[in-house]
Image: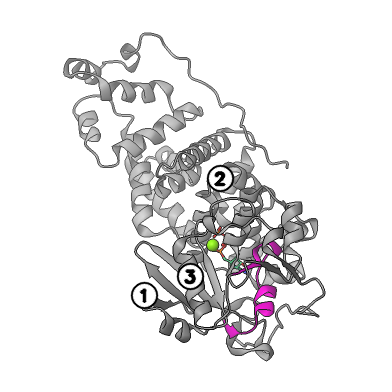
């Protein structure tokens, strides 16, 4: 079904273009003190065995910005088996990209072999789907060829361990200095080859504070539907990177601006589009804001909470329709959750371990409305109580759920036995638990907008 011949992937006219520049150590700010000892060990060891060895990609880009990279990628002319022969602590992984992982306790240094652009250029195999997507990419080549097949110019800078210079084949250093995110080659073709690059453009632009070059921004609106051809498991990984980057508020805004969000979360986008200034947007903005704060404070973030929030509005609307037509509320939420999730995983494959917890958080929302008898005590002991309570508080803060109810639960958790008894008594009104009655708020104006 697939052929490696059609259509031809992007190929530069002059792989060794006059643009090639070498920036000696004195002309850039990458200091070895910012490079992990393990990555340095790998680089020096390959060098000692007479292989070429460079750092490349995100780590070089981040080092140039003076940021601490999250991981270090090494490239070399050694083939995977040769890399394995050099390092005892090494495993070969991957099918789409065959790579070596060199393990040092918790840290893994990824070592890849230079890859070529297409079949005529090197050894190995590359497969394309009919619409031009790269399915497998194991053709080995030279460092220049390796540079041209990367996505953005700023992601194609090489730090040479031999003389500590930075090698630039694609004008990445100039773009880096100017804060420009630019695809290597013809933008539309590069997006068609791998539509995930559209998501990467948004992710890097926001994370680095760079501007997507207009020629690379323009096709995104048009080509966003191509994301439909991407395996949903890969899109899940991308969504995690997009939303757990610490910049999720802006990322969300940009994804919507480029029509990409609706490709990832169609039902959510539908709800947001119906109420452009309404509380679904305010609620999501709030959840994302909290997520970013937690990441910036190095606190853990639970993906289930984020996904539960992202899909809350479609679930809520569907559950309410079911309740209206006579279903019991808890049952209605369970059914709505199943239906929404079944459709959602076609675009972004949320793993079952996560969707199970999302379902619990959603199903607890109507149960939290029951504040009399023994039920509140039972809920306190529920393993998802805390998450469900936090969820309710956010809903209440943004005007969709009852403020008094959220406050009742806040109070109930810290109340002594006698107070709890009084609070759960039949007719023990929620309002009786507070000194002042808080007026139920309407939706607040969202902090984020769509126009950029
Ligand atoms: P991050 O800081 O998020 O890790 P990164 O640039 O290192 O950013 P990775 O996904 O780790 O991103 O990829 C490493 C490098 O591999 C990139 O810098 C880029 O050169 C290349 N690359 C990754 N994905 C693609 C792609 N879809 N198309 C072309 N090149 C890619
Ligand atoms: Mg990386």
Q: Which residue is mark 1?
A: 89
Mark 3 CB near ligand 2 (8 Å cut): yes
The answer to which quarter of the image holds residue 88 is bottom left
In the rendering, at what x and y percent does residue 7 appear? 70, 83
SS at circle 2: helix
Q: Which mark is residue 110?
A: 3
Task: Give 429 or 301, whichever is nearer the viewer.
Answer: 301
Expressed as whole percent of the image width and height from the top left, the position of residue 139 reads 59, 85
Q: Can you give x and y, in whole percent of width and height, for residue 236 in the image?
A: 49, 60
* Disc 2 and disc 3 in contact, CB within 8 angstroms: no
Query: Which residue, given by chain and number where applicable, does mark 2 sit on?
Result: 248
Which image quarter is the C terminus in?
A: top right
Marks 1 and 3, Cα distance to the nearest angstrom?
Answer: 12 Å
Q: Give the CA distance from mark 1 to mark 2.
A: 36 Å
Determine the residue positioned at 55% across, 59% down: 32
Q: Is residue 403 magenta?
A: no
191 and 401: which is toward the camera: 191
Front residue of 424/395: it is: 395
Residue in the picture at 38% in, 53% down: 355
Query: Farthest residue in the right direction?
Result: 18
Residue 36 lies left or right of residue 167; in this view the side is left
Q: CA distance from mark 2 to mark 3?
A: 27 Å
245 above or below 47? above
Relative image position of residue 103 (x, y in whole percent)? 38, 69
Q: Which residues are drawn in magenta?
A: 138-160
């Amino acid at each position: 079904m697939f052929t490696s011949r059609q259509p031809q992937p992007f190929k530069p006219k002059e792989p060794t273009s006059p643009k090639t520049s070498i920036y000696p150590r004195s002309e850039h700010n990458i200091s070895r003190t910012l490079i992990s000892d393990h990555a340095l060990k790998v680089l020096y060891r390959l060098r000692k065995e007479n292989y070429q060895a460079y750092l490349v990609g995100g780590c070089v880009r981040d080092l140039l910005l003076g940021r601490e990279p999250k991981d270090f990628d090494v490239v070399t002319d050694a083939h995977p088996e040769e890399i394995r022969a050099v390092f005892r602590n090494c495993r070969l992984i991957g099918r789409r990209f065959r790579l070596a992982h060199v393990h040092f306790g918790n840290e893994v240094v990824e070592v890849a072999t230079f890859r070529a652009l297409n079949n005529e250029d090197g050894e190995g195999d590359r497969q394309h789907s009919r619409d031009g997507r790269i399915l497998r990419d194991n053709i080995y080549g030279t460092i220049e060829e390796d540079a041209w097949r990367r996505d953005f110019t700023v992601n194609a800078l090489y730090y040479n361990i031999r003389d500590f210079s930075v090698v630039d084949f694609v004008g990445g250093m100039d773009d880096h200095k100017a804060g420009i995110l630019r695809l290597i080659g013809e933008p539309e073709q590069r997006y068609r080859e791998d539509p995930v690059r559209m998501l990467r453009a948004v992710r890097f632009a926001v994370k680095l504070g760079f501007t997507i070059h207009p020629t690379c921004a323009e096709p995104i609106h048009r080509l966003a539907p191509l994301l439909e051809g991407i395996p949903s498991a890969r899109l899940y990984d991308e969504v995690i990177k997009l939303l757990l980057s610490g910049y999720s508020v802006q990322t969300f805004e940009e994804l919507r601006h480029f029509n990409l969000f609706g490709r990832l979360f169609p039902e959510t986008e539908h709800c947001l589009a119906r109420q452009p200034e309404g509380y679904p947007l305010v609620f999501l903005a709030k959840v994302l804001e909290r997520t970013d704060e937690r990441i910036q404070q190095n606190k853990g973030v639970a993906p289930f909470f984020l996904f539960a929030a992202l899909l809350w509005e479609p679930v809520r609307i569907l559950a309410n329709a079911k309740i209206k037509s006579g279903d019991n509320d808890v049952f209605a939420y369970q059914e709505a959750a199943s239906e929404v999730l079944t459709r959602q995983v076609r675009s972004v494959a949320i793993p079952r371990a996560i969707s199970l917890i999302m379902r619990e958080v959603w199903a607890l929302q109507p149960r939290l409305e029951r504040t009399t008898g023994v039920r509140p005590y039972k809920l306190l002991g529920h393993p998802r109580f805390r998450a469900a309570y936090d969820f309710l508080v956010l809903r209440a803060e943004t005007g969709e759920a009852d403020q008094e109810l959220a406050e009742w639960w806040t109070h109930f958790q810290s109340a002594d036995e006698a107070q709890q008894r009084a609070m759960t008594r039949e007719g023990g009104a929620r309002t009786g638990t507070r000194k002042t009655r808080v007026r139920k708020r309407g939706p607040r104006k969202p902090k984020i907008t769509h126009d950029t």
